[in-house]
């Protein structure tokens, strides 16, 4: 009976081992298949990508770890398996997770949040690992992304693509420096199952991990034409003894980014491009206002009417200025004494001036560019001088619009 009991236990163990799900991964190009990239299967339901960064340590996204294991020192036995795909010199191999070692802070309600986890395998992998590079990512730097695309048959294909990092983009207004914690790559086409893919240098050093793909809605610009945006965690912020030590982490590395912060950061980024133009904008507007006053012989004083609107990614005009007549610049008492000498009929002033607007455009990477755009206006100002001696206001016609203008002295009294 004792021998039978032991044999039964062995059978159960063997069945359990056979039932452990694996993720079949092949290389699209076996000659260029890095040994360190793995396919990851967790709880037999979902797949991700990961990378071997030490002999027995795999890095992936935190959201690729089951929710109940998202803390340091959690046992992940029988929950996560990894697949090392076959290449010209290697056969397909499998590994099993033993313990979750280090995780990023809890995920927030935005894609612009650090998203990484490192777990230890049950044994050392017979593969070359990829060292971590904490130097950060420069604007325009092209990263090599090794990603595993899931197929309809429950397998995956390891593919290599190149993605340029884009700073100062509304796709991610927090990516403004080499060591900003979250990267934006535009264009960079990814798909579900690519999460955790390593972002590598040409020397196969890991600078970060792919977090997710994004849309304009992720940065509160629901209409912005961002195509194939991907976000990634910058390993310049890592400080894990024996794995990666950032010499001088960015000040924002520990900053908690939530959706409410994104709109403010986007506005701050836009202002970096619009603020330098405002001095010229104000000077141009005032110059045209002075021109209109002279063209209308100062008979009428004019006001500036400015309309501002939030940038939504499509409507490029964020500020535009027009001019409208405000009041009659004559003393009423003086006008009455000269009533008999006032001419009959209408007086017409021909006006020509510029209405200035401030426009914002996005380039293909979602970077804002601001410019001042003039609009040439040709119009007329028409009124009857004889009417100036009657009542409290006078009928004026500016272009196609009619106004009933008060005297400036009455306006000032109010």
Image (cartoon, helix red, strand yellow):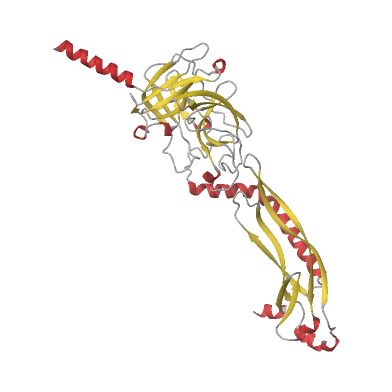
Image position, residue 333 (x, y; %): 76, 86
Question: Which residue is at 58% across, 20% downward?
Answer: 203
Image position, residue 246 (x, y; %): 51, 29
State whether residue 132 is above or below residue 356.
above
> Which quarter of the image is occupied by the C terminus?
bottom right
> Which quarter of the image is occupied by the N terminus?
top left
Question: Which residue is at 71% across, 80% downward?
Answer: 409
Pick the residue in front: 77 or 248. 77
Q: Is residue 310 visible?
A: yes
Question: Which residue is at 73% across, 58% downward?
Answer: 356
The part of the image, by quadrant, that contains residue 153 is: top left
Question: Which residue is at 46% across, 28% downward?
Answer: 152
Pick the residue in front: 52 or 9. 9
- Judge from the rendering whether residue 100 lies leftward or rightward of residue 36; answer left or right: left
Q: How many marks?
A: 0
Q: Is residue 242 visible?
A: no
State whether residue 216 is above or below residue 165.
below
State whether residue 126 is above or below residue 328.
above
Residue sticking out furthest to the left = 1
Residue sticking out furthest to the front = 153
- Judge from the rendering whether residue 68 lies leftward or rightward of residue 297; answer left or right: left
Image position, residue 374 (x, y; %): 75, 56
Pick the residue in front: 262 or 401. 401
- Judge from the rendering whether residue 172 lies leftward or rightward of residue 93; answer left or right: right
Image position, residue 247 (x, y; %): 53, 29
State whether residue 24 is above or below residue 345.
above
């Amino acid at each position: 009976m004792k021998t039978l009991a032991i044999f039964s236990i062995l059978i159960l163990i063997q069945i359990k081992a056979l039932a452990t799900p694996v993720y079949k991964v092949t290389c699209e190009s076996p000659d260029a298949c890095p040994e360190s990239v793995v396919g990851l299967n967790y709880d037999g339901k979902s797949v991700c990508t990961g990378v071997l960064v030490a002999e027995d340590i795999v890095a992936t996204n935190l959201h690729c770890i089951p929710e109940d294991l998202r803390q340091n020192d959690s046992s992940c036995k029988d929950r996560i398996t990894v697949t090392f795909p076959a290449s010209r010199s290697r056969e397909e191999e499998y590994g099993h997770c033993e313990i979750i070692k280090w995780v990023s802070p809890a995920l927030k309600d935005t894609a612009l949040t650090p998203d990484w986890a490192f777990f230890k395998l049950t044994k050392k992998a017979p593969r070359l690992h990829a060292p971590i590079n904490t130097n950060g990512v420069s604007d325009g730097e092209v990263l090599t992304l090794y990603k595993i695309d899931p197929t309809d048959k429950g397998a995956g294909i390891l593919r290599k693509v190149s993605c340029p990092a884009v700073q100062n983009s509304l796709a991610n207004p927090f990516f403004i420096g080499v060591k900003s914690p979250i990267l934006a790559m535009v264009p960079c086409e990814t798909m579900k199952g690519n999460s955790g893919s390593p972002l590598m240098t040409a020397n196969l050093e890991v600078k970060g991990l792919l977090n997710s793909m994004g849309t304009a809605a992720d940065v509160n610009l629901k209409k912005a034409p961002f195509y194939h945006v991907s976000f990634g965690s910058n390993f310049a912020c890592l400080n894990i003894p024996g794995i990666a030590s950032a010499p001088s982490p960015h000040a924002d590395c520990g900053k908690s980014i939530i959706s409410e912060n994104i709109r403010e950061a986007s506005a701050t980024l836009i202002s970096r491009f619009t603020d330098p133009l405002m001095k010229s904008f104000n000077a141009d507007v005032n110059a045209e206002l002075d021109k209109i006053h002279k063209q209308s012989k100062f008979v009428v004083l004019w006001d500036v009417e400015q309309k501002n609107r939030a940038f939504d990614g499509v409507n490029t005009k964020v500020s535009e200025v027009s001019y409208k007549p405000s009041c009659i610049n004559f003393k009423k008492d003086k006008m009455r004494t000269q009533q008999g000498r006032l001419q009959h009929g209408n007086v017409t002033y021909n006006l020509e001036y510029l209405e200035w607007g401030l426009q914002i455009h996005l380039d293909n990477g979602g970077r804002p560019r601001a410019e001042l755009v003039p609009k040439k206006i040709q119009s007329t100002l028409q009124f009857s001088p004889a009417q100036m001696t009657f009542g409290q206001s006078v009928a004026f016609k500016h272009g196609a619009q009619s106004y009933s203008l008060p005297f400036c002295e009455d306006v000032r009294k109010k």
